[in-house]
Amino acid sequence: MSFYTMVLRKSGAYWVAVCLENGLVGQGDTKDAAIKKLKGAVESFEEEYKKDTDIFNAPIPIKELHEFLTVEGKEPVSEEYELRLMHA
């Protein structure tokens, strides 16, 4: 089991979670639902990566993280974000 860092943000009526180590994303009506989707995506990815290590696997680039954090304007809205540690 590995540990991953995720950032959660509100996007309209949904919560979106992105894994900083691999760029995978989960979305749900609640924080917990978004985390559950992301955890499932990470676990599926890990299983496939064990079978085929030629699959691209890299941390999310800073530019993409900035795009994720910029909700609908040019500046991030910090009160809408949450950083968490997840194990999968």
Image (spheres, rainbow, N blue to C red):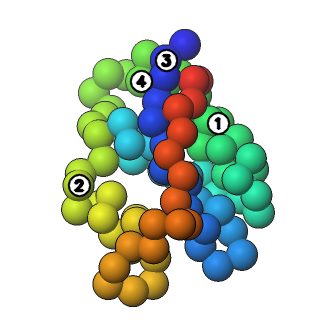
Relative depth, front residue between 51 and 36: 36
Residue type at the position of mark 1: Gly
For label 3, the residue is: 2
In the rendered image, residue 1, in percent from the top left (x then y), is placed at: 55, 13
Judge whether residue 45 can be spotted in this image.
Answer: no
Q: Is residue 83 above or below residue 21?
A: below
Is 75 located above or below residue 62 in the figure?
Answer: below
Image quarter (top left, top right, bottom left or bottom right) of the C terminus: top right
Q: Residue at x 47, y 30 (%)?
A: 4
Residue 64, position as x, y percentages in the image: 29, 61
Instruction: Give, as a three-letter code, the residue at label 4.
Output: Tyr
Q: Give the distance between the C-alpha atoms of the residues marked 1 and 3, in whole angstroms.
A: 13 Å
State the CA–CA distance, disc 4 to disc 3.
13 Å
Residue under label 4:
49
Whether residue 36 sits left or right of residue 45 in the image: it is right
Q: Earlier in the sequence, mark 4 or mark 2?
A: 4
Report which residue position mark 1 lands on.
40
Name the N-terminal-most of marks 2 and 1: 1
**Front-lying residue, 73 or 49:** 73
Q: Residue furthest front?
A: 79
Which badge, 1 or 4, is on the more N-terminal residue?
1
Lower sequence index among marks 3 and 2? 3
Marker disc for residue 62:
2
Q: Nearer the viewer, mark 1 or mark 4?
A: 1
Q: Nearer the viewer, mark 4 or mark 3?
A: 3
